[in-house]
């Protein structure tokens, strides 16, 4: 077997498969940094995938599809924000409901669209000069869509915003200690709404990528549990956008290998691999008080009510 | 900042009620710049409520607030800050994992969008010099001592242009030395023309710090006096509404066999760092060992490891000669260890269960309260009736949910449960924290009575006066180590203060004293 081409193919596919995970994880990191757990990632992604496909198919341009995916993800997230911030509903229940609702609605609306190839998919971007490099060119710079690179840029930008700007201090403080933020006059609810909305937007793009660029077609349930991997990745990345980059691509590689190794290992076992790994990540991060040192926001999952300590 | 006389605030007839309580009843107060105004009263007298209204956290039901001659309606903390009113809460409002600069920059207008902490660090340096409040802007807040955290809170208020600064129980977390430092800072702030409100229930420091003292009781102002024209006894009378005896009668202790021997205890905190670093303690039956120290120096971990709620990394715990290291909470309790926990509502009772159910919680699984897995309610009721009478628990009935009782009565309920069956060892954590004078006296008497009946009592408290009054020997904890153990009769406040600040007492000097 030609090892170079095997490696080139694996890395290139791992990147492509890691993209939706990266976008979703970046979104979840922002929501959780503000103190809101959103287990509705799967739902937001599938809604984004459906909306992206439907709009791109209708208007004949992948850009409109991705915009629609982002908008739909955001609207879905705002519903979660309304329930958990304004009505102070249980965040886990609301998130699960969002996932089930999203899967159901996208399945229902998508019936007529099933099995048709997208007429205007998002194509690969051949980066000039870099794309002509031997090995590295085909590995990194020839078979990727623009969303791969945008995702990495987004991670950098989000990291800078979180750790090097005023706004970042506000977001992190709201997630760590909302009472403190409230005491200096920050509108805790508003910050949380914004972060959850941005989170939904990014998850929507992740879903849209699947139907507009990766496949490109629509299948019911095509997110196939990616939303849950995102939740685990958020912890794996210690709520840090930069660590989300390699976390997402590592899981992308696991996904890809689960196809590639089917010749040698039973496919059922291989399909389990990313999920088993996610469980492993959660178990490992649960040991030794890693929750605190791993950087989980102090007020994660807790509704904020003024006057309670 | 502007000239003097800018800080003139009048609160007029402020009234605020919460369900079932009138927290402020037509309270009036005048604050002037360049003065420290103490707000004195017992817990629950309404001091903090009043200041939370001034700071915009609560809205008054009635009454007016005038700032610099203008009537204002303070809507939020941000609004209060814009009027020049800052507040340092008793429980600091800081983001612990963040740095000092990040905490100060939070929500601070005028900081740049990019790299805000750098600009803030520069401004902090100026303020620190001016008021004598040194802090390192890059340190993480959870690494700071309580005194340093308080400095951060004061700086947060000053950098926002606070002309009036409200300090809610500022000395409760400080060592005596740090209290002195704080008073110096307040002096500088006075000189700069700030008005300061100093909330406290400690008479001595109020007399030392304040120019004016306003005493509150049950939501009302009892009176406002000049600090130099009053004394401790007069203030105490105003505060409690009757004459107060400052000394309990206490018999000399007669130590018996060893109740507790702890050797070389190493215990980790929730954060994973070593909270106790090789502590050894011995406590006899019939004596009270007071554990003094500033909060967060390992007291919680000590109490938890001795009551089976936390595992010892290393070391041994013996109760009545029996090795109970790493024994479960129930095993310890069955072996005669009573626990009066720090957080009485969270850990001391099940709020939704009735008084009688709470009273048998510790022994509900054993006769006479349980036979063959079935609760014997009649036995429980009899026991509850006796306990309510003996410990003077004020409750509508034995079947009232425990959460409806007042703090003092909840604490009496816990004591009634824990002290029944005469335990050999009582671990009491902050037993009178937040209680009024009457309940405090009663709890202290109960503890002394238990000591005289032959129990060894480990009394953990941040209230130095309480420890000096009750304990027979005093151990001082600092950063997880014991700085020294001194007999209570020989200990001076200064000496204990030094140990609380980390000065080790030479072992040879023990017994020398005075």
Image: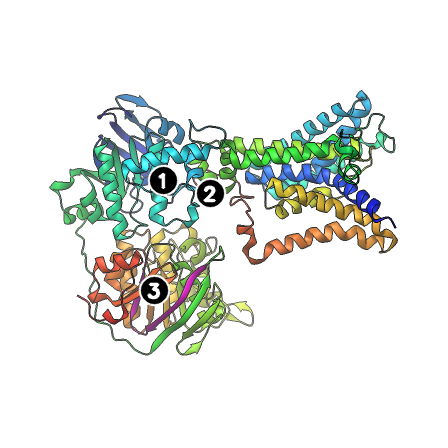
Residue tagged 2: B98
Q: Left of A304 or right of it: where is B73? A: left
Q: Are marks 2 and 3 in contact (CB under 8 Å)?
A: no
Residue tagged 1: B153
Display coloring: rainbow
Q: x and y percent of residue B265 in the render? A: 42, 68
Give the camera-side residue of B62 and B208.
B208
| Residue B482: assigned label | 3
Q: Quadrant of residue B511?
A: bottom left
Q: x and y percent of residue B419 in the render? A: 37, 67
Tell me how far mark 1 sits from mark 2, CA to CA.
Answer: 14 Å
Tell me how far mark 2 sits from mark 3, CA to CA.
Answer: 30 Å
Give the prevailing secondary structure in the magenta stretch: strand
Q: Quadrant of residue A120?
A: top right
Q: Left of B208 or right of it: where is B155? A: right
Tell me the quadrant of the picture where the C terminus of chain B can be found: bottom left
Q: Is residue B16 visible in this depiction of the protein?
A: no
Packing grade of label 2 (10 A; few <14, some 14-19, many >=20) is some
Residue at 45% across, 71% down = B315
Q: Left of B240 or right of it: where is B312? A: right
Residue at 32% across, 35% down = B127
Packing grade of label 1 (10 A; few <14, some 14-19, many >=20) is many
Q: x and y percent of residue B432 in the render? A: 32, 56
Give the chain letter at badge 2: B
């Amino acid at each position: 077997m030609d090892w170079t081409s095997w490696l080139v193919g694996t890395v290139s596919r791992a990147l492509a498969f890691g993209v939706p995970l990266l976008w979703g994880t970046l979104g979840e990191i922002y929501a959780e940094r503000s103190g809101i757990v959103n287990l509705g990632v799967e739902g937001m992604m599938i809604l984004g995938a459906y909306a992206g496909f439907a709009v791109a198919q209708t208007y004949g341009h992948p850009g409109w599809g991705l915009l629609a995916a982002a908008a739909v993800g955001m609207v879905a997230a705002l519903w979660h924000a309304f329930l958990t911030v304004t009505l102070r509903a249980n965040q886990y229940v609301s998130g699960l409901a969002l996932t089930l609702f999203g899967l159901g609605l996208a399945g229902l609306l998508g019936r007529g669209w099933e099995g048709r190839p997208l007429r205007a998919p998002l194509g690969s971007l051949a980066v000039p000069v870099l794309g002509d490099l031997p090995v590295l060119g085909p590995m990194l710079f020839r078979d990727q869509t623009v969303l791969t690179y945008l995702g990495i840029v987004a991670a950098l930008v989000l990291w800078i915003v979180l750790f090097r700007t005023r706004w970042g201090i506000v977001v992190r403080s709201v997630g760590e200690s909302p009472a403190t933020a409230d005491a200096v006059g920050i509108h805790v609810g508003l910050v949380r709404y914004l972060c959850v909305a941005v989170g939904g937007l990014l998850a929507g793009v992740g879903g849209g990528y699947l139907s507009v660029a990766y496949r490109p077609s629509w299948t019911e349930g095509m997110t196939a549990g990616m939303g849950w991997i995102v939740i685990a990745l958020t912890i794996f990345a210690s709520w840090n956008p930069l660590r989300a980059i390699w976390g997402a691509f590592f899981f992308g590689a696991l996904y890809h290998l689960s196809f590639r190794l089917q010749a040698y290992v039973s496919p059922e076992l291989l399909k389990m691999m990313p999920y088993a790994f996610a469980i492993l990540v959660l178990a490992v991060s649960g040991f030794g008080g890693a929750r605190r040192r791993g950087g989980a926001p102090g007020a994660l999952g807790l509704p904020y009510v003024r006057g309670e300590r | 900042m502007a000239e003097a006389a800018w800080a003139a605030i009048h609160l007029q007839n402020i009234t605020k009620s919460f369900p079932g309580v009138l927290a402020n009843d037509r309270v009036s107060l005048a604050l002037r710049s360049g003065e420290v105004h103490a707000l004195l009263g017992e817990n629950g007298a309404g001091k903090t409520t009043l200041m939370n209204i001034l700071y915009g956290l609560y809205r008054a039901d009635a009454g007016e607030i005038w700032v610099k001659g203008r009537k204002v309606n303070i809507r939020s903390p941000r609004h209060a800050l814009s009027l020049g009113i800052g507040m340092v809460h008793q429980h600091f409002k800081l983001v612990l994992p963040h740095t000092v600069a990040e905490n100060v920059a939070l929500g601070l207008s005028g900081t740049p969008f990019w790299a805000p902490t750098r600009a803030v660090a520069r401004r902090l340096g100026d303020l620190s010099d001016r008021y004598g409040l040194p802090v390192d802007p890059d340190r993480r807040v959870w690494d700071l001592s309580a005194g340093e955290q308080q400095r951060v809170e004061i700086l947060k208020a000053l950098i926002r242009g606070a002309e009036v600064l409200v300090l809610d129980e500022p000395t409760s977390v400080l060592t005596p030395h740090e209290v002195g430092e704080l008073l110096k800072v307040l002096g500088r702030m006075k000189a700069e023309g700030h008005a300061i409100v100093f909330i406290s229930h400690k008479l001595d420091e109020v007399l030392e710090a304040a120019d004016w003292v306003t005493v509150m009781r049950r939501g009302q102002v009892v009176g406002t006096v000049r600090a130099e024209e009053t004394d401790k006894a007069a203030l105490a009378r105003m505060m409690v509404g009757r004459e107060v005896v400052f000394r309990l009668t206490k018999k000399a202790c007669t130590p018996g066999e060893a109740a507790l021997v702890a050797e070389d205890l190493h215990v980790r905190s929730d954060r994973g760092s070593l909270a106790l670093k090789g502590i050894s303690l011995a406590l006899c039956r019939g004596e009270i060992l007071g554990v003094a120290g500033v909060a967060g120096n390992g007291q919680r971990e000590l109490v938890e490891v001795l009551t089976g709620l936390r595992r010892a990394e290393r070391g041994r715990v013996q109760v009545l000669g029996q090795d109970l290291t790493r024994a479960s909470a129930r095993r310890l309790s069955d072996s005669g260890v009573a626990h009066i926990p720090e957080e009485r509502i969270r850990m001391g009772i099940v709020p939704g269960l009735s008084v009688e159910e709470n009273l048998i919680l510790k022994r509900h699984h054993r006769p006479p309260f349980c036979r063959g897995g079935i609760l014997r309610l009649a036995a429980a009721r009899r026991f509850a009736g006796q306990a309510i009478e003996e410990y003077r628990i004020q409750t509508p009935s034995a079947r009232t949910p425990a959460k409806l009782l007042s703090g003092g009565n909840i604490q009496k309920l816990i004591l009634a449960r824990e002290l029944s069956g005469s335990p050999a060892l009582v671990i009491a954590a902050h037993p009178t924290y937040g209680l009024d004078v009457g309940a405090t006296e009663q709890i202290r008497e109960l503890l002394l009575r238990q000591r005289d009946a032959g129990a060894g009592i480990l009394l953990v408290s941040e209230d130095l006066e309480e420890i000096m009054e009750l304990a027979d020997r005093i151990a001082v904890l600092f950063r997880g180590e014991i700085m020294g153990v001194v007999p209570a009769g020989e200990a001076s406040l200064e000496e204990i203060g030094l140990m609380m600040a980390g000065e080790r007492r030479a072992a040879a000097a023990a017994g020398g004293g005075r």
